[in-house]
Image: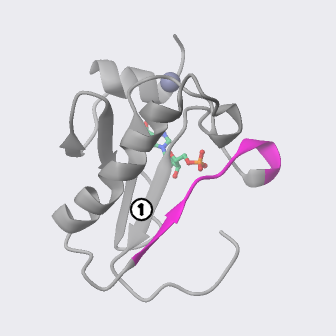
Amino acid sequence: MSCIFCKIISGEFPSKKVYEDESVLAFHDIKPNAPVHVLVIPKMHIESVDALDESNIDVANKALLAIPKVAALLGLKNGYRVISNCGEDGGQTVPHLHFHIIGGKKLPIKLN
Ligand code: 5GP
Ligand code: ZN
């Protein structure tokens, strides 16, 4: 498996972990674009939102449910932004489903 995030899950690549349970991992983005920038990923390799279907939606839901827990751990009491880039036009660079949690300041209104 050549997927970077699968290697982070297996421990082959290091990461700064924020939260982990049996099906979800959250870790700091290596190139943060805000004071807080964390990625929440399912441990199962799902390519993107576009690959969601009945067979993997429970796993994706677990990642979504982890988002408020991670936000609380990060102290994001005043809100945050959740982004999932999908495919080439969506700007996705790592083909393993992930939800960016971005915050720690009032974010500008923009498309990404
Ligand atoms: P995308 O562009 O696919 O929406 O988001 C991928 C994110 O993964 C980017 O924000 C990028 O900085 C982050 N990223 C890429 N490689 C690594 C890595 O090896 N470690 C960590 N922690 N983040 C990574
Ligand atoms: Zn993967």
The residue beneath circle 1 is 101
Relative image position of residue 49 (x, y in whole percent): 64, 42
Q: Residue at x 35, y 51 (%)?
A: 65
Q: Residue furthest front?
A: 54
Q: Is residue 112 above or below residue 91?
A: below
- Which three-letter amino acid code belongs to the residue tagged 1? Ile
Secondary structure beneath dot 1 equals strand
Q: Is residue 43 left or right of residue 69?
A: right
Visible residue check, residue 44: yes
Relative image position of residue 56 (x, y in whole percent): 53, 27
| Label 1 CB-ligand 1 distance < 8 A | no
Range shown magenta: 80-89
> Which of these two is toward me, 112 or 46?
46
Can you tell which quarter of the image residue 58 is in? top left
Q: Residue at x 62, y 86 (%)?
A: 109
Q: Is residue 30 left or right of residue 54?
A: left
Q: Is residue 51 above or below residue 33?
A: above
